[in-house]
Image (tube, grey):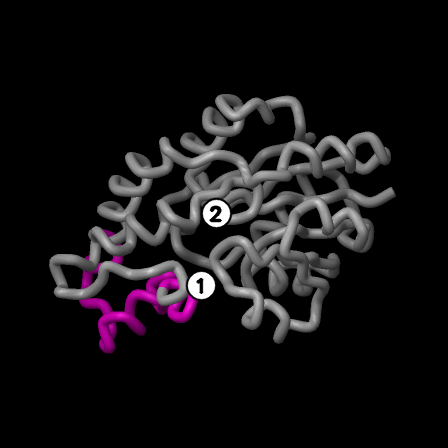
Amino acid sequence: MVHVVWDWNGTLFDDVEAVVAATSEIFAPYGLGPFAVDEFRAFYTRPIWVAYERLLGRKLTDGEWERLDSAWHDSYHRLMEQCALAADARQTIDALTAAGHSQSLLSMWRHEQLVPTIARLGLADAFHRVDGLRLPEQAGGHKAGLLDRHLAGLGVAAADVIMIGDSADDALAAQEAGARAVLYAGGMTGLAGLERLGVPVVTRLADAVNHI
């Protein structure tokens, strides 16, 4: 049996439209946007402040990242109320549980918003552990390192883990931890970008079961 670590935003939670709309809102005062999903995917990367610098064509000034990040969360928390789980998220979680695999969730979204959202969407009992960001200075950064702490909290060996996420950052975090990854092309990174990473890529979450 394996342990599956799920990503949240753009993977189980189908919120890409809200992410893009929030990004468009915070860059409107700069005369940029609105962005389409494919445009967003072209500049999206982590750390997110690097993506913002790509958009602006310059380095962020002192305090600019913090202001943009705060404004983005204000917009996102309003827009994400219209979002739902990915179409086959519950089906896939249930199939993995039925097969005897354990599951947890590691997100780069704020922990205090993540936990009640998971409960509201009926997944409170689906995971052995849920970790979001608890420290403000972690915002916008990489998942690597956080995955190590997540697995240590579970007492699970990385060799027994498959990370399912939607971005290069998920694959890199898994690689650094010594775990495997399956990537879902329905989130922050397009299919072509994911296929260059050399790990299995699926276009439906349910297909991830075939790689476990």
Q: Secondary structure at mark 1?
A: loop
Q: Which residue is mark 2?
A: 108
The N terminus sits in image quarter:
top right
The percent position of residue 179, horizontal first and vertical second, equals 74, 57
Q: x, y (%) of residue 6?
A: 63, 44
**Residue 46 disc label:** 1
For image coordinates 37% across by 49% down, the residue present is 19
Q: Are marks 1 and 2 in contact (CB under 8 Å)?
A: yes
Left or right: residue 115 versus residue 152 is left
Could you say which is closer to the camera, residue 95 or residue 139? 95
The verdict on residue 179 being magenta is no
Q: Which quarter of the picture shows residue 170? A: bottom right
Label 1, label 2: how many angstroms apart (C-alpha)?
11 Å
Which range of residues does the magenta coloring cover?
40-66
Q: Is residue 60 magenta?
A: yes
Amino acid under label 2? Met
Which residue type carries mark 1?
Arg
